[in-house]
Amino acid sequence: MTTHDITLVSGHGGMPAPEGVLTLKHLIDGAWVSSTSGETFERSSPATGQLVSQAAKGTAQDVEAAVRAARAAFDDGRWSETPGSARAKALSRMAELIDANCERLALYETMESGKPISQAEAEIQGAADIWRYAATLAWNIRGDSQNALGPDMLGMVLKEPIGVVSIITPWNFPFLIASQKLPFALAAGCTAVVKPSELTSATTVMMGELLIEAGIPPGVVNIVLGYGDPVGGLMTTHPDVDMVSFTGSTAVGKAIVAATSKTLKKVSLELGGKNPQVIFPDADLDQAADAIVFGVYFNAGECCNSGSRIIVHEDVADALNEKVVALSRKVPFGDPLNRTTKVGAIISTDHQSKIDNYVKGAAEDGAEVLLGGAPVSVEGLAGQFYQPTVVAGVTANMAIATEEVFGPVLSVLTFSTFDEAVALANGAAYGLSAGVWSENVHTCLAFARKAQAGTVWTNTWMDGFPELPFGGVKESGLGRELGPNGIDEFLEVKTVQMRIGKTRQTWV
Ligand code: NAD
């Protein structure tokens, strides 16, 4: 397959890249500080190779200082005892500031991640809405009461902030994912230590700047930049941390569960996915093909919700493949700074090789590469790009059918009966999301009930709302973000039992 079959956007004519290199520091107890070691690490654009940022490289002492600040800020009540209404106002101010700074945030999100600028802008706007929604929850923290325990007893159930939370995020949606955690933790009254991915630190630092402007008191949000070792690791083992909220790979999620077991912290995990979309023979194939192309190429497939696994009825498989390949050829990919681009660069050369190995392995195992299947160069850009790729004839035993490829690569499997479709859909260790396409609502609902997934989309793919909970089952995670559940994750339940009057008999 030649690159002439796909739609490349060259590196000429896009919006200008920022000049200079951004210096990024830790935010500890309200101050911007360098690493105690003085060391830094660099991030270059995966699309162009341009040096974008130079960040403080966190040490054990930096983590210690950040946790100490968060602990003190929680224990003295400067945030946890602030009325919910006041917390809500600060979160709403933050939403306004995010909107006002959207352009700059989106530009650096694109520069470090390689995602298209128009998509980065939409993500920043979506993040602002999440902060706005979390503010409403801060107004509404309610417990419960039990008034039927007998004439001399009243029970109350209080919701309290869990304490100091470590928030650890990945590189694929840096600002958005931090915004699925931090505003809910803050709405609950918690304090936090945040660590962004070492590949995409810039916009989390900018979030810290905006939080100061929004009036969040010093020490309430601390940011430590750096790697899993030592920064992330210590954030999960430190005895003064009460909870770890992590988004990232299933392998690191499992390591975090093991690490936190020594101090039995609460853990919430948003992990990987191998998300199936099942297409029944009565589906609207044009609609399905459009959603499939969006689902697999959005964020270059570097997306936990990537709809990377199509399970199509054998009677319509050829017709669907034809439509998907035709649309895939049209997807504009290339320069992330060009507004027409829909698919940008791959995050790193190592990751590009991993994607390519999955495709080559599937071809060796007998699958058929209908489109793409190789890296591609884009004129004027020095970074790494991978062709939109469609692999048909995939069978359940192939690695590409069950493992997270995390690239613009679609695997197509076929089925003949409903039960077979369900078995294939549930045949991966993951359980993040699933989709079903049929004009028959009974088929859609029957599938939705059987699917082992945290979210099921019927005749659509990857819609998301701050109001609706999101999370995974099986090896895709523990707990839920967003919706009312988003704040519950950061609240502890305390039971208070009160005797009324002096009716109690003495025990002896
Ligand atoms: P990753 O697991 O390699 O890293 C995630 C974060 O954990 C980074 O900040 C990293 O520095 C840190 N880390 C690494 N080792 C650590 C350790 N031992 N202890 C503590 N922290 C550690 O993931 P990634 O490559 O950055 O992101 C891609 C993965 O994230 C994919 O698997 C994807 O599916 C998943 N993801 C899931 C969701 C979701 O909501 N379910 C959303 C986005 C991404």
Image (cartoon, rainbow, N blue to C red):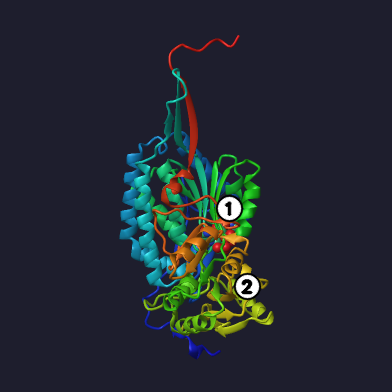
Mark 1 CB near ligand 1 (8 Å cut): yes
Q: Closer to the camera, 45 or 144? A: 144
Using the rendered view, name the quadrant where residue 363 is placed.
bottom right
Left or right of 469? Residue 477 is: right
Please, what secondary structure does the residue beneath circle 2 have?
A: helix
Task: Specify whether residue 114 is in view.
Answer: no
Residue at 63%, 68% (x, y): give it.
402
The disc, 1 or 2, on the residue closer to the chain's N-terminal end is: 1
Q: Residue tagged by mark 1?
A: 232
- The residues tagged by marks 1 and 2 sit, at their Cα atoms, a distance apart of 29 Å
Please, is residue 90 above or below residue 112 in the view?
above
Q: Residue tagged by mark 2?
A: 400
Badge 2: how crowded within 10 Å, few (<14), some, or many (20+)? many
Across and down, in percent, residue 290 comes to: 43, 76
**Amino acid type shown at disc 1:** Gly
Q: Which mark is residue 474?
A: none
Using the rendered view, name the quadrant where residue 466 is placed.
bottom left
Q: Closer to the camera, 211 or 365? A: 365
Residue at 31%, 55% (x, y): give it.
96
Ligand 1 quarter of the rendering? bottom right
